[in-house]
Amino acid sequence: MRELGWILLLPAAVLLIFYIGERLRSRKLRSDLLYINRKLAELANPDSTLGPERLLVVTGEPELRDLLGRINLLIDRAAQSASDHASAEQAMRRMLANVSHDLKTPLTVVMGYAEMLDRSPGLSEEERRGMLGQVYRKTVEVHERINAFFDLSKLEANDYDLPLAPVDAAELCRRRILGYFDLLRDRGIEIGLHLPEEPVWIYANAEALERILDNLLSNAIRYGADGGWLELNLNASPQSVRIEVIDRGRGIPASEQLRVFERMYTLDDSRNRGFQGSGLGLAIVKRLTERLGGTVSLESEPGIRTCFSLTFPASPYTPPGYSR
């Protein structure tokens, strides 16, 4: 009879254990859900000083694990978005400070010369013309920097019309370097050219490509003139066309190379009278190159060699009377 009693009690014991387990499981699930709800409420509070924090719950429930994975993914994306926003705000503040500097300096010169012209009636004609020349040059400088700022804004807003057509990149490179020949000669800078005689076609916008090259060439002259060398190369393959602008000047430290294409970025010592620049040229180079379907890269060993490289897809276009 005693053995029969234990046999009859066994199912009841199993049911009791199962009931207790389900209650504990339900309590753990409830606790986990309360934890998740509390953490999400903290993260959603705009006044919260807490940083983005992943939800950590140990659970055997597959549905709950999937939910936690998706919530943590959203938290990671929100953290990245907040970081990008903070970086953008910092870049905007830096950009506004640099714009203010870049406009204030030439405008101060203009105001100074204008005041001298107004208050010095005894100036000679030669002195007066010299001052007016300075006023004109500084006014042109302000105009160019304002235009560069708005051009970059239009590029970033994708509001810059760039009709594409076959362009002979080799001939365009020759024309652009010829435009700097007198300046390079006056500064004692030697020129190295490696441009093929035959046409090298890319599908691009001639005006945009000219501006890209002008920005790179003027950048090399401004910051690399102390090296006494400027080189322009073009190498073509059936798949791509690579254009290189090389100088042997002071170069760009490795720690700065990832930032040179940012808006309003200039090296610290470039913000003096000898190395003033708007900080927009390389940003415009990057945006225009990307709009033309190309890429731009930088390699620099300070004091030895600095190379900006443009790579574009080769065009299948073949002009009349020319065979590949």
Image: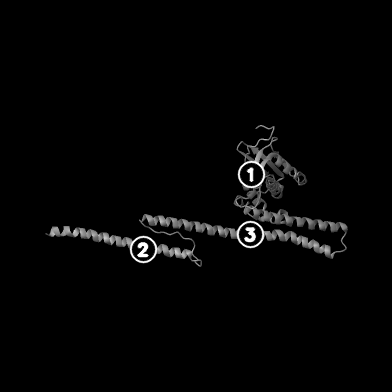
152 or 35: which is nearer to us?
A: 152
Residue at (67, 56) in percent of width and height = 150
Residue at (64, 44) in percent of width and height = 309
Q: How is the image coloured?
A: one colour
> Mark 1 or mark 2, which is nearer to you?
2
Residue 312 appears in the rendering: yes
Q: Position of residue 185 (x, y in %)?
A: 77, 44
Between the C-alphas of marks 3 and 2, the distance is 49 Å
The quadrant of the rendering that contains the C terminus is: top right
> Mark 3 or mark 2, which is nearer to you?
2
Answer with mark 1 or mark 2, whichever residue precedes in sequence: 2
Tell me the number on the disc at residue 200.
none
Report crowding for label 1: few under 14, some 14 to 19, many 20 or more residues within 10 A (C-alpha).
Answer: many
Tell me the number on the disc at residue 30.
2
Between the C-alphas of marks 1 and 2, the distance is 59 Å
Q: In the rendered view, would you say 53 is above or below 189? A: below
Amino acid found under the numbered disc labelled 2: Arg
Q: Position of residue 172 (x, y in %)?
A: 71, 41
Q: Kindly state the secondary structure of the residue where label 3 is placed.
A: helix
Q: Kindly state the secondary structure of the residue where label 1 is placed.
A: strand
Q: Position of residue 267 (x, y in %)?
A: 65, 54
Q: Which residue is mark 1?
A: 310
Q: In the rendered view, would you say 324 is above or below 132? A: above
Amino acid found under the numbered disc labelled 1: Leu
Q: Which residue is mark 3?
A: 94
35 left or right, relative to 100? left
